[in-house]
Amino acid sequence: MNIIGKRAWEMPEHLATPEHLFFNRRQVLAGLGLAGGMAGGLMPLPLRAEEDPSAGLYPVPRNSSYVLDRELTSEELVSSYNNFYEFGSHKRISAAAQKLPIRPWVLKIDGLCDNPQEIGIDDLLKKMPLEERLYRHRCVEAWSMAVPWSGFALAELVKLASPKAGAKYVRMETFQNPDVATGQKQTWYPWPYVEGMTLAEATNELAFMATGVYGKPLPKQSGAPLRLALPWKYGFKSIKSVVRISFTETRPVSFWEEIAASEYGFWANVNPDVPHPRWSQASEELLGTGERRPTLLFNGYGEQVAGLYAGLENEPLYM
Ligand SMILES: Nc1nc2c(c(=O)[nH]1)N[C@H]1C(S)=C(S)[C@@H](COP(=O)(O)O)O[C@H]1N2
Ligand SMILES: [Mo]
């Protein structure tokens, strides 16, 4: 990919205004012949899989430990403004993402663990204690959302796998299917998308596997049926549509790190004082509100995570 030139995700901020969304939605509806009403008994745009077999599990009880300092971002914006390069290097991938089959969906658990296995998503959902958490979500492009994820603590999945003593890192991988995810035909990207974290980060209370949002199963564009949420790190760490989790002794090289390690490091903790080469991180746009706010160190989660980095001061923790 072209590192120097302008990327699609450097879309000017004004394109994220509510005006643009309204315009875009009207275009979508017009394209379906739905503008001006539901004539002819047409069904609404199926942006959510109505037959998702996990639908009956939601809504799940909210864990009240995670409180926000801002309003939730609207469900419409959360499900229509996405980064998911498998379906295109721009934000409007939600229609294209509907092609992704999410059943059957098998998660492979392997590497340095005592219980390697392949487990179907619906069996996994039955084993995991589902809860809702309100999290801030901060992209390195300097925009943010506030999202009510449903899912389970990643620590629960780690417990199921039972890592061996030598396991130091957790590596996750997204599906690979260029027939449905046409972005994966762009062979200059190092597909499949990979992310990694230390075992200590993975078992921190904040590390969360999201399986739903807004009291429903995750829509495909959000990374159905299983995506990571590491709210103290930049959004690119929060890998979507995970098919494999591996326990490793060596540090995994993540997708964006392989493309440009000096811009998208392994740690990628949110820090207002460490700018990305193209985006100052001093402040962020709260999408859908028109408001900019100063960015918070660790995205405001320092109390839970700062201790993870004691003794690592020589690491590039913030990029
Ligand atoms: N597999 C995969 N996961 C991904 C991405 C991607 O392109 N592919 N984009 C990342 C980036 S840059 C961000 S900001 C978040 C966006 O999540 P959202 O669309 O739910 O807001 O997903 C992350 N996870
Ligand atoms: Mo991002």
Image (cartoon, rainbow, N blue to C red):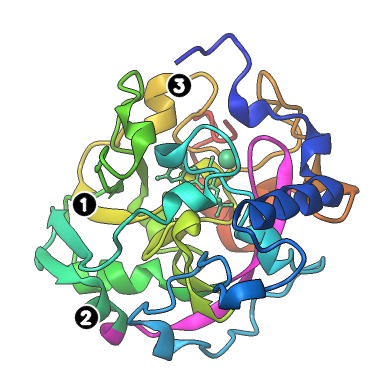
Q: Is residue 36 above or below residue 156?
A: above
The tag on residue 261 is: 3
Quarter occupied by residue 32 = bottom right
Proximity of marks 1 and 2: CB atoms separated by less than 8 Å: no
Instruction: Assign a secondary structure to mark 1.
Output: strand
Assign the N terminus to one quadrant of the image: top left
Residue placed at 56% from the left, 73% from the top? 42
Label 3: how many residues lie within 10 Å, few (<14), some (14-19) or many (20+)? some
Q: CA distance from mark 2 to mark 3?
A: 37 Å
Quarter occupied by residue 176 = top left
**Residue 157, x across and y down, in percent:** 29, 70
Q: Is residue 286 above or below residue 260?
A: below
Determine the residue located farthest toward the top in the rendered image. 4
Q: Is residue 165 above or below residue 235?
A: below
**Residue 58, x across and y down, in percent:** 48, 87
Dot 2 amino acid type: Asp
The residue carrying mark 1 is 247
The tag on residue 123 is: 2
